């Protein structure tokens, strides 16, 4: 007997009982079936095509192995779009949308912007859409990550320049009206409290940094001033407990910049703007 969508989700809930990602199976089924969240709800009593039911059973087995649903179906939502993701890039988080919104609001008149460590390109390519008069450059040290970002640009029809670079090493003397980055900021000491799925499947290169998570902030801050136009700004995401250390770092490394910290919607300090 063919399962209905509702029966399939109930079965998956039983198979995944006790796991943190209770919505993973629903997300997978929405993407596999081509549904919006409300569309899946409207069709919950419909019989599933046999091929989709077979695929869904395979997907749930992967979810049981803690594989992120976004990697299973190959896409993740960000700012109203679906972006291709692979294990070469981080899965975008909602908090990063808040950083993008801040930059987009502030930089309405910008004509050039740089997204450092772009990963899948969610930050830079979203800003390319929100700021149509701004030429966005997207860089990453990882060639595999940059390839994902380029695929997203093609699929979403976004214009951007792509550069493989370790921070600013390959950018020469280029300057930008603003620079934005979600740098690796997790200390290795934090692994005991991290999600098993993140540790097992997401790229460590994009997660961890030395010096208790501050090493790349230090290198970035020391170099970024040479790549900003006069009056330029920097936008950064960071860990919820890192504000005091970063405030001290910025005061020492770039005393000419004004640091404005901002909380995310959950009330945690998670982002900063450096105005030069």
Image (spheres, grey):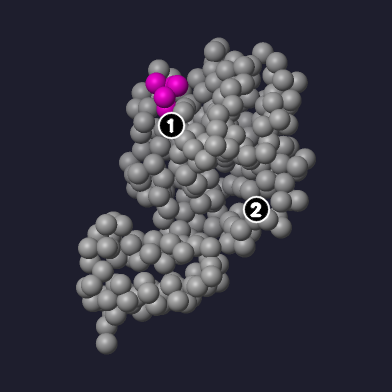
What secondary structure is the magenta-colored segment mainly?
A: helix
Q: Position of residue 169 (x, y in %)?
A: 65, 32
Q: Nearer the viewer, mark 2 or mark 1?
A: 1
- Span highlighted in magenta in the image: 104-108
Between discs 2 and 1, the one toward the N terminus: 1
> In 3D space, how far apart are the residues under numbered discs 2 and 1 (Cα atoms)?
26 Å
**Alpha-carbon neighbours of circle 1 within 10 Å: few (<14), some, or many (≥20)?**
some
Q: Residue at x 51, y 51 (%)?
A: 91
Q: Which residue is mark 1?
A: 101
Q: Residue furthest bottom?
A: 1
Closest to the observer: 241 or 127?
241
Identify residue for label 2.
204
For image coordinates 49% across by 47% down, the residue present is 92
Q: Secondary structure at mark 1?
A: helix
Q: Is residue 247 left or right of residue 67?
A: right
In the image, is residue 105 part of the stretch drawn in magenta?
yes
Q: Would you call the spot at circle 2 few (<14 residues within 10 Å), some (14-19), or many (20 or more)?
A: some
Residue 138 pos. (x, y %)? 50, 36
């Amino acid at each position: 007997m063919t399962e209905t969508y509702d029966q399939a989700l109930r079965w998956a809930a039983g198979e995944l009982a006790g796991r943190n990602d209770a919505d993973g199976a629903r997300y997978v089924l929405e993407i596999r079936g081509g549904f919006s969240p409300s569309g899946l709800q409207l069709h919950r009593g419909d019989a599933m095509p046999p091929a989709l039911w077979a695929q869904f059973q395979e997907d749930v087995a992967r979810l049981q192995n803690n594989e992120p649903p976004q990697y299973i179906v190959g896409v993740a939502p960000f700012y109203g779009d679906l972006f291709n993701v692979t294990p070469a890039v981080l899965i975008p988080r909602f908090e990063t949308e808040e950083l993008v919104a801040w930059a987009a609001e502030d930089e309405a008149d910008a004509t050039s912007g740089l997204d450092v460590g772009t990963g899948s390109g969610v930050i830079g390519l979203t800003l390319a859409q929100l700021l149509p008069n701004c030429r966005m450059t997207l860089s990453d040290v990882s060639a595999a990550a940059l390839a994902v970002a380029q695929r997203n640009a093609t699929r979403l029809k976004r214009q951007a320049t792509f550069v493989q670079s370790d921070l600013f090493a390959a950018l020469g003397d280029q300057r930008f009206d603003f620079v934005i980055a979600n740098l690796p900021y997790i200390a290795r000491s934090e692994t005991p409290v991290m999600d098993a799925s993140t540790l097992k499947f997401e790229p460590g290169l994009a997660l961890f940094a030395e010096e208790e998570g501050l090493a790349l902030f230090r290198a970035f801050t020391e170099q970024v001033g040479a790549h900003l136009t006069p009056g330029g700004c920097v936008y950064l995401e960071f860990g919820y407990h890192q504000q005091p250390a970063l405030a001290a770092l910025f005061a020492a490394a770039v005393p000419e910049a004004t640091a404005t910290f901002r909380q995310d919607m959950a009330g945690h300090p998670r982002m900063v703007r450096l105005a030069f």
